[in-house]
Image (cartoon, helix red, strand yellow):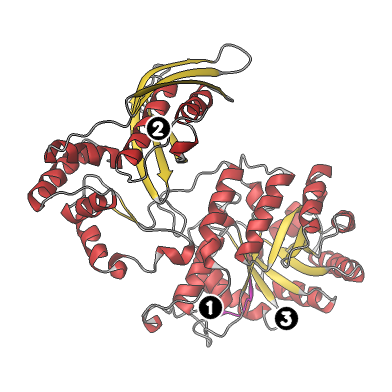
Amino acid sequence: MKFSDDTDRSSLLLPVHNSTDQTIPSDRTVRLLDTTLRDGEQAPGVSLSPDQKVEIARALERAGVAAIEAGSACTGAGERQAISRVTDLDLDARVTSFCRGLQVDVDLALECDVDGVHIVVPSSDRHVEGKVGTSREDNLATTADLVEYATAHDLWVEVIGEDGSRADLDYLEQLAETSLEAGADRFCFADTVGHTGPERTHEAVSRLADYGPVSAHTHDDLGLGVTNALAAVAAGADLVHCTVNGLGERAGNVALEEVAIALSHVYDVDTLELEELYDLAQIVSRATGVQLPPNKAVIGENAFTHESGIHTDGTLKDDKMYEPYSPEIVGRERRLALGKHTGRAGVAATLEEHGVDAGPDEIAEIATRVTELGDRGRRVTDADLLAVAEDVTGDDRERVVELLDLTATSGGAVPTAGIRLEVDGEERVASGTGSGPVDAAVSAVREALGSAADAELESYHVDAVTGGTDAVVTVEVTMMRDDRSVTVARSEADITRASVEAMVDGLDRLLATDEKPLAPADD
Ligand SMILES: [Zn+2]
C-alpha cells in the first residue's frame, strides 16, 4: 500500500556513514524473506506444529513475502513433514530449508521438495576453527562443492556466512566470491549474534555486493536490527531476512513488520501488503504463545492508542497530530484509552461512541472522576466510564441482563456449569459444558441468552492482582455486537465468577444502548 499522506521524506532519510550511495532510492527493489518458521521457532519455548506452520505460511503469503524459510530439514522427521506441508501449499513465495554445510542436509531438504536452500557455513575464525574445526581453505573448498551439488539438483541456493559480522572481511569476500562462482544465487551477510552496527554492516555489504546479489540477516541484541537491515539495503542488499514480531533466538531477529513499515514510510519502498501485518502478528502470537509487547512498533496494543488528554484532543482535531501514519495502513484501528491522563475530549468522544448524551458540565465532572479512578493505578474500562456517566447524569437505567446465580464444577470428567439470568425481566436457566469451568460457564451464558444476543467475545485477559494461592484475579473482556464493542473488568477471588460477571455486564451494556432488541429465548 502506498502512502497518500503529505510526509516530507527529505526530512526522514537517514544518510549512511561512509558511503557514496547515501540512502535508499524509492525505485529500489527490496524483498523480504521470512524465517519465523525456522529462526523464529528457535526462540526459547517456541515449537510449532505442522498445522501451525501451514497457517502461518498462508498468512505470510497473504502479506506478500518473497520467500519463506519453512524449517531445518535436518532436525527430524516431524520437521520434514511440516516443511513438506508448506511446500505442498504451492505458494507464490519461494519455500526454503536451512541446511548445515553438509550434503546430507541438502538431501533431506530435497526430500521435502523445497524450492531452495540456505547453506550455512562458518565465516569467522571463531566458527571456522572453534565450532566446525576446519581451516579457511578447506571451508572454501567444501562450500564450493556443496553449492555445485545443490544447484545440480535444481535448488535455488543462498550461502550464509555464519557470524559474518565478526569475520575477517577479506575472508568473507573470498567466501562470497567462491560461493557465487560455484553457482550460488546469492550470498548472505549474517550478523548472527547481533553484534555489529550500521557502519560495519554498510562496509561489509558494499564489498560483498561487488560479487553478486547479497542478503542481510540481522539480529536485535543491540536494538540495531532494523538500523542494520536498512544500512545493508543502502549498501546494496536486496533481500532482508526477518521474523514476524521479531521472534528469534535471544533478543530475536529483526521484525518483519518494522522493516516493511520503515522501508515504506521513510524511503517509499514497497515490500509487503502492509494491511495484512496485524493479522499476521496475531496469528503468530497465538501459535507461539508469545504475547505482543504492548509498546512494540506496528503490532503493540499501545501503538495507536491515545490516553493523554493533550494527545487525545490533538488526535481528535487532526488524525496525524500524534501519529506518524494511519493505523489502517497496517490493518489496525486507532483507540482512545481512558485513564489517569484522560481529558474532556477523550471522555466526550468515548461517550458519543456509546450513544450517551451529556452536557459540558457533566463531561467535565465525568472526566474528573475518570482521572481519579486512573490515579488509583487502574485502566478505566468502557463499563467504568458508563457507570460514572450514569451516576453524574442521574440517568438511571434498567439492567437488560442480570446474573442471578452461577454454579460450576470441575470435579467430574466433564466440567459443567449452571446459570440463572434475568433477561428483560424474564428468568432464564441454562447449563453448559466445556474444557474447563470458565469455558463451561461461558457456554451456559450463551445458552441462556440464545442466538439473539449474537455478541462475540473479542478478547479475554486474566491478571493475578496478588501473587499467592488466594490471589484475586482481574478478568478483562471485550465484547462485540455488530460494530460496537465494550470492555469490562471484574476482580474476584474466583476466576469463573469474575469471567461470567464481566461477560454479563458487557452484554448488558451492549444490549442496553442498542436499538436492536433482544429476541426471545431460543427453544
Ligand atoms: Zn539468525
Nearer to the camera, 248 or 440:
440
Quarter where residue 310 is shown? bottom left
Amino acid type of disc 2?
Met
Sequence-first disc among 1 and 3: 3
Tag 1, which secondary structure? Answer: loop
Nearer to the camera, 24 or 380:
380
User: Could one spot residue 499 in this view of the protein?
Assistant: yes
Query: In the displayed structure, does residue 142 sit left or right of residue 96?
Result: right
In this rendering, the answer to whether 255 lies above or below 41 is below
Amino acid type of disc 1?
Val
Residues at marks 3 and 2 touching, judged by CB atoms closer than 8 Å? no
Q: Which mark is residue 503?
A: 2
Measuring from the top left, give residue 383's x and y in whole percent.
29, 38
Disc 3 within 8 angstroms of ligand 1 (CB): no
Label 1: how many Cα within 10 Å (few below 14, some 14–19, many 20+): many
Amino acid type of disc 3?
Gly
Marks 1/2: CA distance? 45 Å
Specify the farthest residue to the top: 411
Magenta stretch in the rendered image:
234-239
**Residue at x-position 36% and y-position 24%:** 426
Find out whether residue 235 is within the magenta segment: yes
Q: Which mark is residue 212?
A: 3
Question: Mark 1 highlights which residue?
Answer: 269
Disc 1 within 8 angstroms of ligand 1 (CB): no
Secondary structure mostly taken by the magenta-highlighted segment of the chain? loop
Marks 1/3: CA distance? 21 Å
